[in-house]
């Protein structure tokens, strides 16, 4: 395979990954690493570097659209970014010392968990309406548009959410993924911020988290331009197409298919990691 | 445009930031595309090998090295410059938010932005733990 064929194939595969990722809301980044490592035999460190780049691209390009809806909470996002960026730098530093086979196994396990999480239905958390005093002090409470007008919400359990965000950041730096699912859980389930606010704020945070990891990867020489180029352009265009289609498409079946693909990839990552082939 | 130039609402700030992000992603993608085209023309016949990890050369790892390479129309350097612009977009977002919070005289969040910014700059400047 020469450079041209290689680049075009990677571009097409990334396009599909970005498209399905946006359409199903699972993010394209989560499949880029296994795709490159298993499908194209790319060293997992190069694959993570390229994946991080694509994560920043999708997060930043989607931000404008999310902002218009008026859901995201910039204070909650920025405050929690202290945890995610610190975690990301720690995770990225661990990645450079860990054997690639171990990274592959951890990656597989995280993929399995995300595939599982995307298949269970989310339940609304009802509970006491006592906000965290810390949240009030940090002016995190806000309002968001609903069909019945602006609705107020309060943030709870700030320290627990903050800790979970550190882990989300560390996983992002270690594996080159956006950790969007874990970020949403931290805000939606732990801090009990409305789901819509959680997902849009999470998207905003993903880019900043990935930039913190990408800096470390760039400096370590894990970001290869020849590989990152088709991945970034593919995922970016694919996810833009996916977002456009999102409004009209029925995504339930797609979600199941995509979850299955992730499931198979996860098992392959774990198997190849244990066999010492990645 | 703004009712009170010193009192930007969070919504206005976020719209501004969102648009800035989108424009920088487009610029980054165009630079990467330009470098990519030169790269493909230049290296068309060669065979890439990513199986064995060797790491990128020094000049493609640092901000100054990438800038030097792009000025000499080095295709891989130009792609890397585009990627650098992309990595910089979230950093710019934090800087903009910092200014917005400063205008709102929100001291706590100015400090929060400064902490996040410090971590980002630490990482981009080759921070090692």
Image (spheres, rainbow, N blue to C red):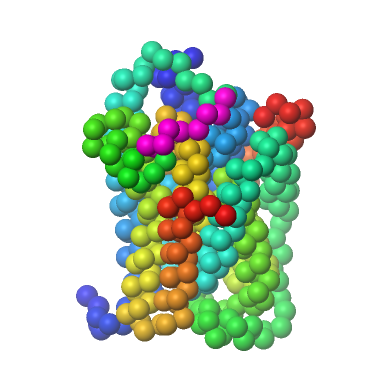
The residue at 64%/83% (across/down) is A132
What is the quadrant of residue A5 in the picture? top left
On screen, residue A169 versus residue A212, left or right, reads right
Q: Is residue B57 magenta?
A: yes
Q: Position of residue B12 (x, y in %)?
A: 34, 72
Q: Main secondary structure of the magenta part?
A: loop
Q: Tell me where the magenta segment starts and ends, as one range.
A: B52-60
On screen, residue A234 versus residue B129, left or right, reads left
Depth check, front residue: A41 or B56? B56
Q: Is residue A181 magenta?
A: no
Q: Position of residue A246 (x, y in %)?
A: 49, 48
Depth check, front residue: A183 or A162? A162
Depth check, front residue: A255 or A21? A21
The residue at 59%/70% (across/down) is A194
Q: Is residue B68 visible?
A: yes
Q: Is residue B21 above or below residue A139?
A: above
What is the quadrant of residue A67 in the picture? bottom left
Number of labels in the image equals 0
Depth check, front residue: A134 or B7? A134
Q: Is residue B15 visible?
A: no
What is the quadrant of residue A42 in the picture? top right
Q: Position of residue A211 (x, y in %)?
A: 47, 52
Q: Position of residue B129 (x, y in %)?
A: 57, 55
The residue at 27%/82% (across/down) is B6
On screen, residue B24 versus residue A35, left or right, reads left
């Amino acid at each position: 395979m020469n450079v041209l064929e290689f680049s075009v194939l990677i571009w097409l595969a990334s396009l599909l990954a970005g498209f399905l990722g946006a359409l199903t809301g699972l993010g394209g980044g989560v499949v880029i690493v296994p795709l490159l490592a298993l499908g194209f035999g790319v060293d997992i460190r190069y694959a993570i570097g390229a994946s991080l780049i694509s994560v920043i691209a999708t997060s930043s390009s989607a931000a404008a659209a999310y902002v218009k809806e008026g859901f995201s909470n910039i204070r909650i996002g920025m405050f929690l970014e202290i945890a995610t960026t610190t975690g990301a730098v720690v995770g990225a530093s661990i990645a450079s010392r860990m054997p690639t086979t171990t990274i592959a196994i951890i990656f597989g396990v995280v993929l399995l968990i995300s595939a599982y999480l995307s298949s269970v239905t989310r339940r609304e958390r009802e509970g006491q309406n006592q906000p965290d005093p810390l949240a009030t002090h940090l002016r995190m409470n806000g309002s968001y548009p609903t069909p019945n007008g602006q609705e107020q919400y309060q943030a709870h359990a700030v320290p627990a959410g903050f800790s979970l965000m550190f882990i989300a950041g560390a996983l992002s730096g270690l594996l080159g993924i956006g950790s969007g699912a874990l970020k949403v859980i931290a805000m939606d389930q732990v801090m009990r911020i409305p789901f819509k606010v959680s997902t849009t704020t999470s998207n905003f945070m993903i880019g900043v988290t990935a930039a913190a990891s990408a800096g470390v990867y760039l400096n370590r020489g894990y970001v290869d331009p020849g590989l990152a180029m088709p991945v970034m352009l593919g995922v970016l265009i694919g996810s833009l197409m996916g977002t456009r289609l999102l409004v009209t498409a029925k995504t339930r079946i797609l979600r199941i298919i995509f979850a299955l693909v992730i499931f198979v990839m996860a098992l392959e990552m774990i198997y190849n990691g244990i066999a010492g082939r990645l | 445009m703004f009712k009170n130039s010193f009192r930007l609402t969070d919504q206005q700030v976020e719209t501004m930031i969102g648009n800035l992000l989108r424009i920088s992603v487009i610029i980054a993608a165009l630079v990467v595309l330009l470098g990519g085209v030169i790269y493909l023309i230049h290296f068309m016949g060669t065979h890439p090998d990513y199986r064995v990890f060797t790491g990128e050369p020094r000049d493609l790892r640092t901000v100054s090295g990438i800038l030097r390479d792009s000025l000499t129309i080095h295709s891989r350097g130009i792609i890397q410059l585009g990627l650098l612009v992309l990595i910089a977009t979230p950093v710019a977002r934090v800087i903009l938010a910092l200014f917005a919070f400063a205008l709102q005289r929100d001291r706590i969040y100015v400090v929060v932005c400064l902490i996040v910014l410090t971590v980002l700059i630490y990482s981009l400047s080759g921070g090692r733990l």
